[in-house]
Image: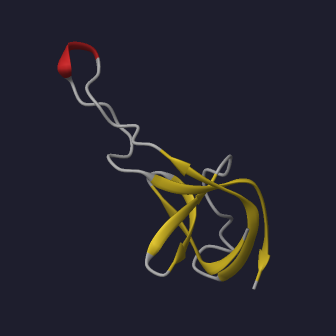
């Protein structure tokens, strides 16, 4: 699948915003400074990732996503 949108880096890693929703890129923690905020075109295999948040040891909350998220596996990208 190929998507196009602004390159953004959030707490969950590098993403592209498409129709107001983040699509994360697996394996990429942050965009390079020259791409951050610019329009990019990203191609990869679309995955639906389940929630990763939940109680940890002793009932303390774990970091993670509290809802399902989309991600592109094995992504490749270029400025749009």
What colour scheme was applied to this rendering of the protein? secondary structure
Residue 63 at what x, y percent from top left?
35, 37
Q: Quadrant of the N terminus?
A: bottom right
Q: Quadrant of the C terminus?
A: bottom right
Residue 15 at what x, y percent from top left?
57, 64
Residue 32 at what x, y percent from top left?
68, 65
22 to the left or right of 26? left
19 to the left or right of 80? left
Residue 33 at what x, y percent from top left?
65, 69
Quarter where residue 34 is shown: bottom right
Q: Depth check: give the residue in front, 33 or 48.
A: 48
**Residue drawn at (35%, 50%), measured in percent from left and top?**
67
**Residue drawn at (45%, 43%), measured in percent from left and top?**
50
- Residue furthest left in the image: 59
77 to the left or right of 12? right
Q: Depth check: give the residue in front, 50 or 61.
A: 50
The count of marks equals 0
Q: Above or below — where is 24 with respect to 17?
A: above
Q: Above or below — where is 65 with respect to 17?
A: above
**Residue drawn at (59%, 55%), measured in percent from left and top?**
71
């Amino acid at each position: 699948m190929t998507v196009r949108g602004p390159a953004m880096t959030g707490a969950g890693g590098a993403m592209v915003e498409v129709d107001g929703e983040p699509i994360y890129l697996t394996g990429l923690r942050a965009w390079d400074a020259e791409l951050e905020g610019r329009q990019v075109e990203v191609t990869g295999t679309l995955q639906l990732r389940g929630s990763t948040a939940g109680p940890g040891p002793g009932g303390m909350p774990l970091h993670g996503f509290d809802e399902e998220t989309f991600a592109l596996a094995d992504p490749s990208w270029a400025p749009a």
